[in-house]
Image (spheres, rainbow, N blue to C red):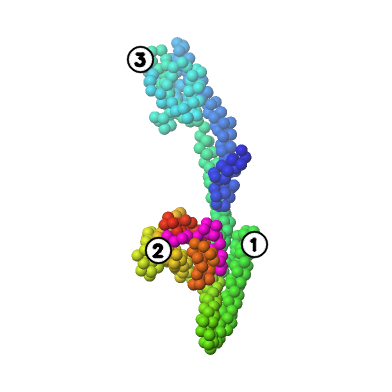
Amino acid sequence: MSYGLNKILKNILPKQLFYRALLIVAAPIIILQITISIVFFDSLWIKTNKGMTRALIGEIKFFIEAYDNEQYNKDSLTKLFSDTQNIKAFYVPHKILPKDNLERWFSPMDRTLRRELKSKFSKYWFDTTSFKETIDLKIKYLNGYFQFEVPKSRVTNSSARTFALWITLPAFLLITISLIFLKNQTRPIINLARASEKFGRGEDVSEYRPSGALEIRQAGYEFERMRKRIIRHLNQRSEMLSGISHDLRTPLTRIKLQLTFIKDKDLSNKLSEDVIEMEKMLNEYLQFSRNRSNEKGIKFNLSTLLSEIIKKYENNNIHSELTSNINLFGKKNLIKRCITNFIDNALKYGKKISIKLKNSNNNVIILIDDDGPGIPKDEYENVFKPFYKIDKSRGVTKSSVGLGMSIASDIIQSHGGNIKLDKSKLNGLQVRIALPF
C-alpha cells in the first residue's frame, strides 16, 4: 500500500528540481495563508458579521413593534428611525412580497441574514445583489409589507478586504523573491548538465566555469577535471596510434618488397594476401580508435544526407521513405560513414533494402531493413564487439576484419544515440538507429 502511495505521489509531484524546490518554499506559505484566512473568517469576520446582523434585525424588530403601538405617530417614528439608524423605512400597503428568490447560498452575508430573519419573522424577502451598497429588505406586515433600504456596511465588516489584500500581497512577494533565488540556484546545475551532455556527444565544450552553491561548484570542478583527463587520454591515444601506424607501415612495406624476390609465386601470393589483410586490419583499427575525429559538430539536414547516400549507390533495389527537413547537430562525415557501413553490409548479404527516416518524440529514427540471411538473436550484442565475426548467417569474408559494426556503434553512441538490431519485415536484419535532436 505504501509503495502504491509513493508511486502516486511521484507521478503527481513535479520532476524538475526548480519546481520541486519552489513547491517546498511555496507550499508552507500557501498553507499558512489559508490557515490564517480560515481562522480570521471563522473567528473574526463571520462572528462579527453575525453580531452586526443580529443587532440590525433586532432594531428592525423593535421598530415594527413600536410602529404597532398606537401611542406613537407613525410618520414621526419612521422619520426618527431613518435618521438615527441610517436606514430608509416605509410601509407599502396592499402589496405582496416578491416570489423570486435572489438569495446566494455561497454568500456568508446572505446566509447570516437569512438565519437571523428566520428567527424573528415568518415572512420576508431580501435582495443583496441589485444595489452595490444597499440591501433591499421587505418584511410582511398586515396587508402589505415594510421595505427597508439597509446599507451593506451595517452587516459586513469592511476590514475583510484590507485583510485579504495584506495577506495576499506578502505571499506573492515572498514567492516572487523565492523564484528569483531558486532560478539563480538551479541555473548552475542546468549549465553543468548541458556541458556534460555536449561533452558526452563529442562536441567541443569551452572552458566550463563552476558557479552556484558550494556543492554545485564542487561537482563542476570535478566535471572539469574529468573532462581534461579524458581529453588528455584521447590525445595520448591518438599520438600513440600515429606512432604505431608509422612504425608498422615501414616493416610491412619492406616485407612487400621482399616478397617480389621470392621465386615461388604461390607462396609469394599467399604471403602477399596476408600482408594486405594485415594492412587492412591496421587501417580499420586506426579508424576505429580515431572515430572521435577533429571534425567539428555542425547542424545539417539528415534527410538530404540520406538522399545523397542512397543516390550514390544507383541501385533500384534500395527503397526509401524519408521524412523531409529533419535537422541534426553532429559530425556529418562520421554519421555518413556509419550509415554507409550498414548499407554496404545490407547490399553484401541481401538484395532488397528499405530505408526509413522518421521523428519519434525527441529522437530521429533511421530504419535499415534487408532481405538477407539475418543474424541469430543471441549474436545481436556480440557483433558490436571489435574484431568479432560470426561463422553463420552472414558468413566469414576476408574483406572484413570485424570492425565495421564496432565503429558504427561507437559513432552513434558518441552522438548520444543507440543502435538496436531486430528481425526485418523483409525477413532479414533490421538496424534501428536512434539519435537525439
**Mark 1: few, some, or many residues within 10 Å (few <14, many ≥20)?**
some
Q: Is residue 277 part of the magenta span, yes or no?
A: no
Which element is circle 1 on?
helix
Which element is circle 3 on?
loop
The dot on residue 426 is none
Measuring from the top left, give residue 90's x and y in whole percent.
40, 20
Measuring from the top left, give residue 334's x and y in whole percent.
48, 69
Return the residue at label 2. 351
Q: Is residue 380 part of the magenta span, yes or no?
A: yes
Task: Give the Cα separation between the discs numbered 3 and 2.
Answer: 104 Å
> Marks 1 and 3: CB-CB under 8 Å?
no
Query: Mark 2 belongs to which amino acid?
Result: Lys
Query: In this orientation, which residue lies closer to the viewer: 68 or 196?
Result: 196
Task: Give the Cα separation between the discs numbered 1 and 3.
Answer: 88 Å
x 50%, y 60%: residue:
375
Return the residue at label 3. 94
Q: For the image shown, how many numbered marks are present on the structure?
A: 3
Mark with earlier residue (3, 2) = 3
**Which quadrant: the N terminus?**
top right
Query: In this orientation, which residue lies closer to the viewer: 198 or 163?
Result: 198
412 lies above or below 117: below
**Mark 2: few, some, or many residues within 10 Å (few <14, many ≥20)?**
few
Which span is picked out in magenta?
Answer: 371-388
Q: Say whether residue 152 is visible.
A: yes
Q: Magenta segment, principal secondary structure?
A: loop
Measuring from the top left, give residue 65's x and y in whole percent.
48, 14
Return the residue at label 1. 218
In this view, the residue farthest toward the top is 70
x 64%, y 59%: residue:
215
Query: Mark 3 belongs to which amino acid?
Result: His
